[in-house]
Image (cartoon, rainbow, N blue to C red):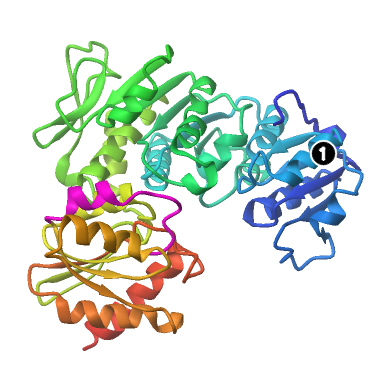
Amino acid sequence: MGGKIIVKISELLEAKVLVVGAGITGKSVARELTKFGATVTLTDEKRSVDSEESISIDEAIQGKWDLAVVSPGWRIDHPFIAKLRAREIEIISEVDLAWELRNEICPSQKWIGITGTNGKTTTVELTAAMLKAGDLKVTACGNLGDTVIEAVCGGLSFDWLVVELSSFQLEWSQKPKFHSVAILNIADDHVDWHKDFKNYVSAKLKILDQAEQVILNADDGELVLATQSWKGKKTYFTLDSPRPGELGLVENLLIDRSFVADSQEASVIAELVEVSPSAPHSVSNTLAAAGLARSAGISHQDIRGAIKSFSPGSHRIETVLEADGILWINDSKATNPHAAQASLMSQLSVVWIAGGLAKGANMSELISKTKNRIKVAILIGTDRELIAKEIMEQAPEIKIIRVDDTQSDSLMERVVKIAKVEAQSGDSVLLAPACASMDQFISYADRGDQFSKAVQELVAQK
């Protein structure tokens, strides 16, 4: 998986490089390596690459390659990868390749890594904002925005990278050495890809041995148990009162008892009302980001300033409209049960829009913990019956409405029309699907955009 491979810029000149996977990451790798004089060829199972430099995987396996760079969506045990190994072709991931190039281009650059089942993107963006508030030259990259290799090779010479890392990326990665790392939570997700939950957890925890310091969620029992045997430097964050050495919540204040001169004392990070939104999982993410920023030497004052001015991106508990006492919320990025649970628990009476591709996830705990919040469930997508089954078994009083997708381009219009009839003053209409979107939409963003558009057209302009 690239552990012993050392890539030198001088060796890339005229090197024949195969980039496996022609999505955002693959195309980014191709662009950057071409700048160093490499001859780059893309390959993908889907063969949807509109380029003369792309070939099928059948053609690729016959080629002569000095190096293969693999995009994170490819499994380590994929038959094509096995064939490359059998031919003794050197294989490396995009993140590991970026680290090797970083060692030559900007060897003093420090990396902060953030992973977890949910909250990664928001925490990455907030951490980067905190570092910027402290006048550090920093960018957010990885599983959002720029790829890691773009951040390293783009010519802007960042002193710090805040890197969002998915389980797919961590499965392949072993080279980077992180200044600090946060693991936000661990819950059921991508079980279809990793084959089982144990493999998924193992992929996430690989990052521990690549970090100087780790920020961990003390409220996540699964995570605490899984990291118990790791003997490195740990700092915990919690929504309870923090013990010495922790970050936490005391009444309406976010408190630091870790990155202080005396752990028996405490420093105020921010007031609860300054966190937007002030839902529990958002506060938890803010504490994690504050811990990472403090590890980078950012002052409490600068951290607080960043928190006060920060606004999460689209599709993350985004209020689309408030009309007639009804709140319309777009949380399309809640693509697994754990994220949907956090979203549902932030509301009291919900007309819930859910469904899509469950990715092997179990919906039982989601329904058991949120059934008292759900008034109506409007279900869409391939795996909607997984959700319907749990509702019928655990909370038969919840009204279930199934919406077929015979006309996907108008699906959200029909969903919003139904929600408009079902919702009353005091309710929240919440798109928190607990599933991926690719069965009916281009992406979670497309799903959220279509929902928001339908709300604006059918509710706001009534």
The residues colored magenta run 355-372
**Res 294 visible:** no
**Res 277 visible:** yes
Is 193 one of the magenta-colored residues?
Answer: no
Q: Is 56 above or below relative to 158?
A: below
Position of residue 43 in the picture relative to residue 343 (left or right): right
Badge 1 local density, few (<14 within 10 Å), some, or many (20+)?
Answer: many
Residue that appears at 65% across and 57% down: 23
Identify which residue, 91 or 293, lies in the foreground: 91
Q: Is 233 above or below relative to 7?
A: above
Query: Which quadrant holds residue 435?
Result: bottom left
**Residue 161 percent across, percent down from the top left:** 53, 36
Give the dominant element type of the magenta stretch: helix, strand or loop: loop
Identify which residue, 287 or 304, lies in the foreground: 287
**Residue 441 percent across, percent down from the top left:** 47, 70
Position of residue 82 in the picture relative to residue 231 (left or right): right
**Residue 264 percent across, percent down from the top left:** 17, 11
Residue that appears at 14% across and 74% down: 423
Position of residue 343 in the picture relative to residue 62 (left or right): left
Residue that appears at 78% across and 55% down: 42
**Residue 95 percent across, percent down from the top left:** 63, 37
Mark 1 secondary-structure assignment: strand
Residue type beneath disc 1: Leu
Query: Which quadrant holds residue 188?
Result: top left
Task: Look at mark 1 in the image and give the residue it sits on.
Answer: 67
Residue that appears at 39% across and 34% down: 134
